Amino acid sequence: MESIKKLLKSEQFQNGKSLLFAEVKKFLRRIRPGKVEGHVKFGLEDPCLAGELLGAAGIFYPLYGKHFTIEPYFDRNLFQGRIGIKGRIYGIHFVLLAWNLFWSRDIRYLVKKIRTYF
């Protein structure tokens, strides 16, 4: 446990973590769908849980609001819908992610350290 705590506080771990988050953020921005449209009906018998699910979906409203509708039902179990997603995902995006992570010394160091624990 002590060696894991030491690894998590190390500068190499912090640098590797920040690089990983930055690369994944770039990757997700590149493969983001161009257009999302559809209609979803959902419901749960527990109104509290249905409201929480609707609130979580509401966070993403600025991304899908114009062409996507959500219709909640608070009195019955239901999940129906139609969703259409348009966009492009190129293989080069995966290659760039792997390339940038592979050539990072901090990431390679962390992979070696993690292998010793497992």
Image: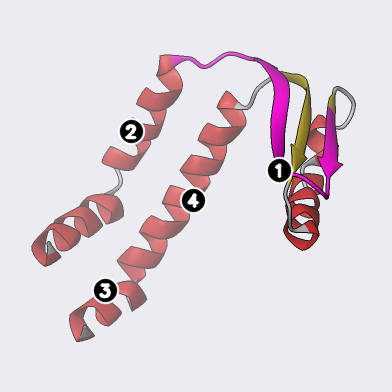
Dot 3 falls on a residue whose secondary structure is: helix
- Please report contact status of discs 1 and 3: CB closer than 8 Å, yes or no: no
- x%, y% of residue 9? 35, 77
Quick one: label 4 or label 2, which is nearer the N terminus?
A: 4
Quick one: label 3 or label 2, which is nearer the N terminus?
A: 3
Dot 1 falls on a residue whose secondary structure is: loop
- Please report contact status of discs 1 and 2: CB closer than 8 Å, yes or no: no
Which residue corresponds to mark 1? Answer: 77
Amino acid type, label 4: Phe
Q: Which residues are magenta?
A: 69-90
- x%, y% of residue 1? 21, 83
- Please report contact status of discs 3 and 2: CB closer than 8 Å, yes or no: no
Mark number, residue 7: 3
Amino acid type, label 2: Ala
- x%, y% of residue 53? 73, 51
Quick one: label 3 or label 4, which is nearer the N terminus?
A: 3
- Residue at 48 percent of width and 14 percent of height: 90
